[in-house]
Image (cartoon, rainbow, N blue to C red):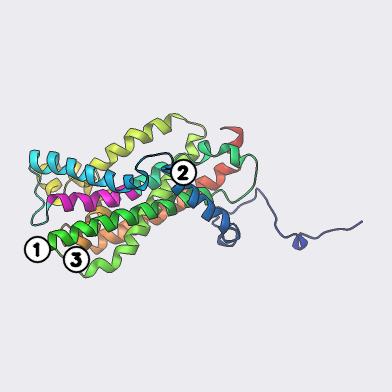
Amino acid sequence: MITHNEDDWLYTISSKRKLVDFNFKEIWQFRDLLFLFVKRDIITLYKQTMLGPLWYIIQPLFTSVIFTLIFNKLGNINTGIVPAFLFNLAGISAWNYFKDCLTGTSSTFTKNQSIFGKVYFPRVIMPMSITISNLLKFGIQILIFFGFYVYYILIGKDIHMNLHAFLFPVYVIMMALLGLGLGMIISSFTTKYRDLTVLVGFGVQLLMYVSAVPYPMSEARLKFPPLVATLVEYNPLTQIIEGFRYMLLNTGIFSWSGFTYTLILSIVIFLIGLVIFNRTEKQFIDTV
């Protein structure tokens, strides 16, 4: 009779996990599956639509037009020397990436219970694939933004980037960490409390209005009650949206303390989400 030591096995699957378990080696071993899920997310989303990927472009453009008409024209929100449409397009492009990461990962367990119940793979690959596939959508919207950016420069508008533009990748990472972390937390709780799926739908819309997406932080300080203005200012998404505009349009409010606070909070929320996600995946199949 042949006996095997633990070291003889190629893979060992165990329910015993560390408190924070993000096994890069195991994720790398399943990288083909990760790329397959990314491809699936991109292709199937608009597979049976007439306009297909053009929706990546139409949605932010129409939203920017509506924001310009309602908030800037009707609501008299001042965006300074920056054209209101470009100001709104910058904020919406950044917000959409966070929103898509959050809403996509918030239903990881409920949408994929049939797969999770049949085959083993690192469960964190699923929310990671959503974050990566949304990065492509974000890239397309950024290209559209720069197209209008060049147009406004050609017609004589005084807009330009500043030296903080080198922080652009860091802001993208912070948006991904926030969306991924909050999404994993919500996804873990939806295995027991399905009401959260309804809450996410309108909660995300409400969150947009306290994240300085359709207005600058300077206007919030001027027109909001002090308590609301403070809530908006310390919202990490506000720091990201304002920093995004500050880098690309040289407008808005930026501080290194706000940047550091947002970066630390993004990492903490991601780690908390990872801990809860890892604990939930051990027993979610019994509660879903």
What count of labels does the image hold?
3
Is the residue 89 above or below the residue 256 in the image? above
Q: Is residue 287 above or below residue 165?
A: above
Q: Residue at x 44, y 42 (%)?
A: 47
| Disc 1 crowd, CA 10 A, few/some/many (<14, 14-19, 20+) | few
Please tell me in which quadrant of the rendered image residue 104 appears: top left
Q: Which residue is mark 1?
A: 158
Q: Which mark is residue 288?
A: none
Q: Nearer the viewer, mark 2 or mark 1?
A: 2
Relative vertical location of residue 247 with respect to residue 285 in this rendering, above or below: below
Q: Find the distance from the CA under tag 1 to the CA under tag 3.
A: 10 Å
**Rendered location of residue 248, percent (x, y):** 21, 62
> Which residue is under mark 2?
44
Q: Is residue 131 visible?
A: yes
Q: Position of residue 168 (x, y in %)?
A: 30, 63
Q: CA distance from mark 2 to mark 1?
A: 41 Å
- Asked where in the image residue 146 lies, by quadrant, the reply is bottom left
Task: Please tell me how crowded label 2 is: few (under 14), some (14-19), or many (20+) other residues with Cα within 10 Å.
Answer: few
Image-quadrant location for residue 284: top right
The Cα–Cα distance between marks 2 and 3, rounded to whole angstroms, is 36 Å
Question: What residue is drawn where x is 47% and y is 40%?
Answer: 187
The residue at which mark 3 appears reads as: 161
Where the N terminus falls, by quadrant? Answer: bottom right
User: Do the numbered discs 1 and 3 sit on residues whose CB atoms are within 8 Å?
Assistant: no
Residue 234 is left or right of residue 10, and the answer is left
- Determine whether the residue tagged by mark 1 lies in a helix, strand or loop: loop
Which residue appears at 36% of the width and 34% of the height? 201
Which residue, as the protein is rendered here, is positioned at the far right?
1
Please report the residue visible at 40 percent of the width from the left and 47 percent of the height from the top: 101
State which region is magenta.
84-97
Q: Are marks 2 and 1 in contact (CB under 8 Å)?
A: no
